[in-house]
Image: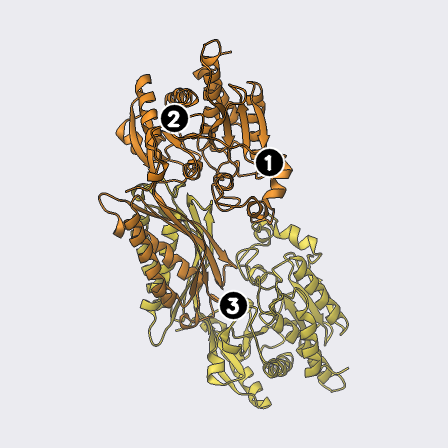
Chain colours: A orange, B yellow
Amino acid sequence: MTLNSTAFLADFTSMSANGATAGGGVDRQAATIADGQNRNWFRGLVEGHGFTVRYDAVGNQYSMLELTPGAPWIAVGSHLDSQPLGGRFDGAYGVLAGAHAAARVQESLTGSSETASFNIVVINWFNEEGCRFKPSMMGSSVYTGKLSAQQVLETTDPAGIRVREALEAIGTIGDFELPVAAYVEIHIEQGRSMEDAGVSIGLVESTWGANKYEFIVHGDQAHTGATIIADRQDALLGASALVVAAREIALEHSTDEHMVITSCGEFNVFPNSPVVVASRVNLLVDVRSTDPDVLAAADADLHARIAAIEKMANVSIERGAEHVWGAKAYDHAGLKLAADAAESLGLTHGVVRTLAGHDSTNMKDIVPTIMLFIPSVEGISHNERELTHDADMVAGVDLLTEVLLRVVRGEFVSASGKAQDSALESSAVS
Amino acid sequence: MTLNSTAFLADFTSMSANGATAGGGVDRQAATIADGQNRNWFRGLVEGHGFTVRYDAVGNQYSMLELTPGAPWIAVGSHLDSQPLGGRFDGAYGVLAGAHAAARVQESLTGSSETASFNIVVINWFNEEGCRFKPSMMGSSVYTGKLSAQQVLETTDPAGIRVREALEAIGTIGDFELPVAAYVEIHIEQGRSMEDAGVSIGLVESTWGANKYEFIVHGDQAHTGATIIADRQDALLGASALVVAAREIALEHSTDEHMVITSCGEFNVFPNSPVVVASRVNLLVDVRSTDPDVLAAADADLHARIAAIEKMANVSIERGAEHVWGAKAYDHAGLKLAADAAESLGLTHGVVRTLAGHDSTNMKDIVPTIMLFIPSVEGISHNERELTHDADMVAGVDLLTEVLLRVVRGEFVSASGKAQDSALESSAVS
């Protein structure tokens, strides 16, 4: 059977039924029943095409296709988990595209005189989204040594369920380990720069820097009716002022060259009763920019405003957990390899930066990495209305196939594990 | 057995163990297990003193002490339910004080030649707090015809449990009905005006007016990293700006004579994930003032600011449910009766207004009503650290006993049900 575009689109439709929501999206938060169902569906699919499936200690799912027995491995991957009421493309597209591309690489080598220098593993990283269990990019953070497996396994969701229990419940945990020599990922853009520019392939040059903080605003519980304003220590007022300040900072620090984006996605009020002044609000604020200096200035401004907010709302603001990554370049040789592959297929392409974090954000710090984008209609993402047209999905799988073919031939990294014509060391963005 | 101050304080300590929290408060939200436990505890207590206990269709608990068979009834009451992590005095003090005062009235009449013109019913109103089921003052709203029993019974909590089911689960629902000729309530102040003034008894002259609104801020779900600022419709930003605006309005509209208080107690973010721009926030905002004109101006200002917030955050703001009550006076004759009673006991007293809503806020609209306060230390309420000193609690029970004695003698309303020297009609605050 030839894995063509029709087969890919059929499999994508089939996969999108797992955890499907009424609004056309999916809800497959990490290690939920729906995520487990989808992981098993994917296992069945790839085993049917000759892959072998294993799990590591934190539930990363490895689907291996051995092209040359004993050869080292290169990885292609993304994540099958989703946001609550998320889109069906985010992450899932990349995993399925990886499986199809790997199988097509095998097909194209079968019967030829070529011997692949690498085998291919498709990795479905555990909990990239970070909504049920924090932080995000959890599985790839353990793989790249940024988090310990022990710490991750003990992490609890809001109901107190630990990662270990959740993974055991869906039966996708093991003790497998596999080193890889390079990493390739394809993902939807989740922005609209490619759609605006009219290109079908994005070659990701670098990540934005991101400073993500938890803030805990401490007030004091009081009666909303009977407590006069002067006596209030209103945590909700303080937290609200912080949300408003974060937006002001984005507007004030963005330049023509370097945009600043600030957000607050999670905001929990205690005790959150109609007639009670809040005693505490936990919120997550993040500040992102393409430029480290602009990011540092915006971040400093955010922290400088905290004292004024504390005074205004008569609260104290504590900084909790943080998750920070710098603006960093992807491998230059990989960018060139992908551009050449796109050219050879006649696909329009352009260089882009990613605002969002991806598993490749972690992987590029330990192995040569190639990150590819396909367009998102209107840039809508983390939304049930997230959409990428069939033609763009198909072009992405074609390109990924061509890129993987070149990588297994040893055109990106050599079989001894060294990058070809590449410089991981020069990965800091100037 | 004589129900003296020692007995009251012992019963109060015993009651405070029901639903006790680690921080010294109670958590007895309406129709929870803890509320049911406390209702049953109270039933046992008053039955031991000769009361008969019944429930009406919405779970209001009537503890009746018949002094003169066939005589009409006057009511004393408050509520046994609490906020989450609430104080042990709010509401519960008034119900227990009512039972002790009623029993002491009976004791003082027993053996005398007097015949009471009224019998006494102690009412524990269902769900005064309004945290689990909205709106607040639910039981007394049904009793006074402001809400229908049907509507209340179908009201659901955040878990989807209906009032009817919750009341049936704790076995405190019935079909009892009892008209009353007058109402008396004693409550902690929940503010610090009495402590500041150094009086032990507050004679409540009027309620503040309150306009309570639910607002629904509609945005659109998006990725917090990948969505540029210009494309965002951030519901959390819009809601936060509304919280900040509400505080500004309180500061700008308060005058030396008439304070304005604004609050937001409940604030729910959807989908509330770390990396998702919120699609919707539901929040409750209330505006209160002693003066109807000042209240109207502050309210108009709040609504006027909504358009600017909608534009700034690129959202739409819908106004949902509302719960509004005007600034209204309590019965003048009742105020005088209570002042005379306090004088006769040598208790310091002063006239106060209540910012908070109470069941008497409803009852005063249908029968002559007396509302009494005892002090709250530092005005702290809806907080586990809520405190009223023993001496103040005891003074309150003494006063309530004296007031009830005068009321059952017919000094407040006549046994034909007419107010003595009173004018319910003139109850609008000038």
Residue B277 lies, in percent from the top left, at 40, 44
Residue B221 lies, in percent from the top left, at 41, 41
* Quarter of the rendering occupied by the C terminus of chain A: top left
Write down the quadrant of residue A34 in the picture. Answer: top right
How far apart are the two marked residues, 1 and 3, measured between alpha carbons? 49 Å
Image mark for residue A412:
2
Is residue A406 positioned above or below B25 on the image? above
Contact (Cβ within 8 Å) of mark 1 with mark 2: no
Q: Chain of mark 1?
A: A
Q: Chain of mark 3?
A: B
Image mark for residue B361:
3
Mark 2 or mark 3: which is in front? Answer: 2
| Amino acid type of the residue tagged 2 in the rendering | Phe
**Residue occupying the point 55% across, 45% down:** A152
Write down the quadrant of residue B259 in the picture. Answer: bottom left
Is residue B61 positioned above or below B341 on the image? above
Q: Which residue is mark 1?
A: A33
Secondary structure beneath dot 3 equals helix
How far apart are the two marked residues, 1 and 2, measured between alpha carbons? 38 Å
Counting residues from the N terminus, which is met first, the one under dot 1 or under dot 2?
Answer: 1
Residue B233 seen anywhere in this rendered image of the structure:
no
Position of B1 with respect to A168 (left or right) is right
Residue B38 lies, in percent from the top left, at 68, 65
Q: Residues within 10 Å of mark 2 (few under 14, many from 20)?
A: many
Q: Residues within 10 Å of mark 3 (few under 14, many from 20)?
A: many
| Amino acid type of the residue tagged 1 in the rendering | Ile
Q: Nearer the viewer, residue B295 or A133?
A: A133
Q: Chain of mark 2?
A: A
**Residue occupying the point 68% across, 70% down:** B15
